[in-house]
Image: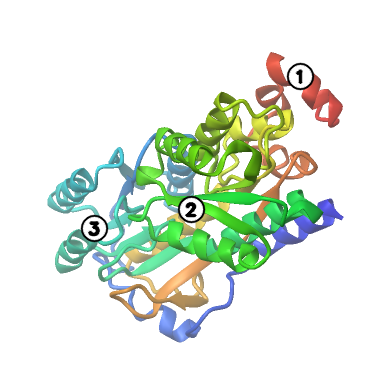
Amino acid sequence: MRRAAVAAAATAMAVSLAACGSAAESGDNADASKSSDNKGPITVGLLLPENETARYEKFDKPLFEKKVSELTDGTGKVVYANAKQDATLQNQQVDTMITNKVDVLVVDAVDSKAIASSVQKAKDAGIPVVAYDRLAEGPIDAYTSFDNEEVGRVQGKALLEALGDKAKSGDIVMINGAVTDPNAALFKKGAHSQLDGKVTIGKEYDTKEWKPENANANMEGAIAALGKDKIIGVYSANDGMAGGIITALKGAGFTKLPPVTGQDAELAGVQRIVAGEQFMSVYKSYPEEASVAGEMAVALAKGEKLDSIAKSTVDSATTKGIPSVLVPVVSLTKDNINDTVIKDGIYTVAEICTGAYKADCDAIGLK
């Protein structure tokens, strides 16, 4: 059944999720700096938010660069900058790319509100902007991400599954992401839609900058406040924080770890799942997301509309009817590692099943 569910989700990745708006509306925001008659090489500015989460440097950047190269017969150039979780630095990076006259910007915002003035500057300079992974504010021309409320729902459902008939026997702790990331609010909303009324939420935190050390401190605070004997499960919004949370649980002397959720299918997270320390993660197809972003960027740089790419729209706090593509997600547990991250070439069995994890891999048939 799990294989069938994963296969169905993978098939669904090719189809944009339904939302408000029409195909005709989805092209209306596609201002661009080049006409489709311009045969000159395209320069794309790619701005990613941080490098502590493994996905950005390992997957998003190279996958996006590959797609732009494919779509431009190798002539397209990607200029890259990483803000290292500094919103002020990211605004400076946008200014530099505007000065250097890139043809289109793809921005994964550190702070969705703080980036708005820079998005407006790009718009004023005739440079279209694609919001990548996080819905930045300002006059965005296109947006692609995952169905972020669904991420939270998947996490919440998995935690309930892990708790079973013990769901009311104690407290769970919710450790959410950063308030500066609009996705974190969506993850939280989705998780609450599953958990509220079915469990007792003893403590809940928003975690500054998504940092594992801050999640670790939050978990230590929850243990001190609630007592370790009362904690039966932990909602963690991503894998990096799950690592910090699990360290805190071990440090407090938990002989049997409560189920802990995650997101991003980071290698360390997958290994913790194999070892039984982390219950689940959320696998998101970075190849699909990066491919869509590349298609959007190249189309906008050429002055083309997005009707054939984006079949739906989303609204931000500042802009209505943004052409969008949302990519579905999959709950990753020890039962479907083969059918997700290994099948899609994200990791090899050898990368996951290093010496410390070999016996655990053998036990679940991961060879």
Q: Nearer the viewer, residue 305 or 83?
A: 83
Which one is closest to the eye, mark 3 or mark 2?
2
Position of residue 70 measured from the top left corner of the image (x, y, whole percent)? 48, 48
Q: What residue is shown at x 74% (from left), y 39% (from top)?
A: 337
Secondary structure beneath dot 3 equals loop
Number of residues whose C-alpha sits closer than 10 Å to that of mark 3, classed few (under 14), some (14–19) or many (20 or more): many
Secondary structure beneath dot 1 equals helix
Q: Which residue is mark 1?
A: 358
Secondary structure beneath dot 2 equals strand
Asked if residue 103 lies left or right of residue 18, the reply is left
Q: What residue is shown at x 71% (from left), y 22% (from top)?
A: 353
Position of residue 243 measured from the top left corner of the image (x, y, whole percent)? 54, 33
Chain-order first, disc 3 or disc 1: 3
Quadrant of res 253: top right
Q: Label 3 to label 1, Cα distance in Å? A: 45 Å
Q: Which residue is mark 3?
A: 115
Q: Which residue is mark 2?
A: 204
Asked if residue 61 lies left or right of residue 44, the reply is right
Quadrant of res 141: bottom left
Q: Label 3 to label 2, Cα distance in Å? A: 28 Å
Q: Which mark is residue 74?
A: none
* Quadrant showing the C terminus: top right
- Residue at the far top in the pictured view: 355
Type of amino acid under label 2: Glu
Q: Is the C-beta separation of discs 3 and 1 under 8 Å?
A: no
Quadrant of res 278: top right
Q: What residue is shown at x 81% (from left), y 30% (from top)?
A: 366
Instruction: Specify whether residue 260 is in view.
Output: no
Q: Nearer the viewer, residue 352 or 364?
A: 364
Q: What residue is shown at x 33% (from left), y 77% (from top)?
A: 29
Instruction: Specify whether residue 10 is in view.
Output: yes
Which one is closest to the eye, mark 1 or mark 2?
2
